[in-house]
Amino acid sequence: MSSPATRPYAVLGVVAVGTFMSALGGSLINVAVPLVRRDLGADIGAASWVLAAYSLSVSALLLPFGRLGDRHGKGRVYAAGFGVFGVGSALAALAPTLASLIAARALQGVGAAMLMANGPALTTAAFPPAQRGRALGLQATATYLGLSLGPSIGGWLAQNAGWHAAFWVNVPIALAGGLLARSLVGGGPAGATLALGGSGRGAGPGAPVAAAGSASARPALDPRGRPFPWASALLFGPAITALLVAVTRGQRWGFQSPGVVGLLALGAVLAAAFVRVERRSSAPLISGALLAQPALARGLVAAFLQYAAVYVMLFLLPFYLQGQLAMSAAEAGLLMTVQPAVMAVITATSGWLSDRVGTRGPALAGMTALTVGLACVAMLGPRPERVSLLAALGLVGVGSGLFTAPNNSRIMGAAPRDQQGTAAGLLAEARNVGMLCGVAASGAMFAALGGGLPVEAAGGGALGAAFQGTMLAASALAALGAGVSAARSSPRAGEAAPAGPPR
């Protein structure tokens, strides 16, 4: 079997399958939740855990699985993720009760975390630095396609075949992806070669060549002989879960309620214990030297701010379209595909661009466009022209698409090869936590500006004014992200120099 380094686009293809499936799995069931609620006799609050269980499971396990990939082979962990995701999907489709469905969704999240935490690292290992941006851009395009297609596919399946079908559709994808992953990255010498971060690179004409001074050429920050940090991993998951549940449920339960206060206290105690264990560990879950890389740290902060800003808009936009503008659900759903569709197109191009001009310029341009786009959404008013609405949403898509691939390349390029699984986990963590915090912040800001909660209860004038103020706050978050993206790193770790034509 040839080294996977000689087949980089085959590796990218199998990574894209996992990326698409995990994104699809997160968005597929959203539209079908009302049917789940009706069939299983659950109230809205209980049914919402069908969505929350997946996101929380992913967020809790991204870093441990990224670190596990660094220790025992990214390809092996990635290939196993398909199996776990497929089993979780089948169990969800067969779930007879709400509790069993929530548990199956959490298992799906375990598989998704295994895929998300190791996919970018596998892509980075398979391509030379001069092609890293375009490769990560194509992978991100698969993510956006999954997020874009999920609601429409899930809605169609739920309407025509029942909500169970929205889970069955993942099973053949997981089976095919798992078989491909085992042959390309997950088993035997080929899987071992790629899992070592490309230690076999140079085996063929397509093998990546580490540039002098590049992250891939630096010595590993964490030798392989040290044990896996189980204590840190067992503290990190419960800590972030408690904090995220408190943040995301605070608006519904009340931020001063005993449940939220208790969760915040529990999360703080567990987080403090996690930090204490990490400081004493010879092989921490998150290397301090890794976080000290300026390009990586700034890239993570910028990614968090970008996703938080976008998801502030995505949470409130359906209420604005269907409430303020009196659109049908179908019409609103169609309009909401504009932003992710534009992102999917632009992301691949921005990755190619960052390979030639560096990562800082495109990332900064993307965040600037996102800032302006969100401000345009805020200023649409009570009766906007359709072209103005499409232009504003399109500009948000351009900004996000232009930012994502260069920023991802900047982060992965700053990580030494034996820490790239951890770096990929941190990147996915920034994305997931940014999404969850953006949704939570949108509700809190909307209520604080007089919109009222639930959002459906807001009147036309109150909804419009609160929507405008919340979107301006989202634009301010993006502007802060632009400031972070503008900062130069010294040395310029992760900042790809213009590479010219691929070698």
Image: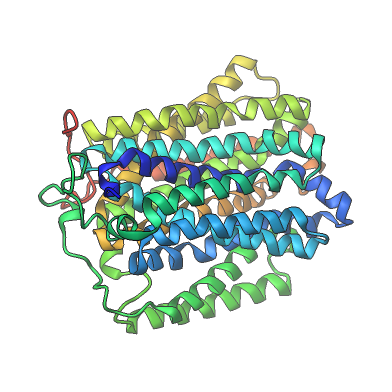
Name the one closer to the observer, 43 or 471: 43
Name the one closer to the observer, 177 or 433: 177
Q: Residue at x 35, y 63 (%)?
A: 73
**Residue at the outermost left position:** 212
* Residue 11, percent from left and from top: 36, 44
Residue 39, above or below 401: below
Q: Does residue 77 appear left or right of residue 456 in this picture? A: left
Residue 427, above or below 153: below
Res. 393 image quadrant: top right
Q: Does residue 221 appear left or right of residue 405 in this picture? A: left
Q: Residue at x 38, y 72 (%)?
A: 285
* Residue 346, percent from left and from top: 42, 28
Residue 417, above or below 239: above
Check the image and tell me how it is coloured.
rainbow
Quadrant in the picture for the C terminus: top left
Name the one closer to the observer, 454 or 91: 91
**Residue at the outermost front position:** 1
Whether residue 499 is visible, yes or no, is yes
Q: Does residue 284 appear left or right of residue 173 in this picture? A: left
Res. 266 image quadrant: bottom right
Q: Residue at x 81, y 46 (%)?
A: 34
* Residue 481, percent from left and from top: 40, 45
* Residue 63, percent from left and from top: 44, 65
Whether residue 429 is visible, yes or no, is no
* Number of numbered discs overlaid on the protein picture: 0
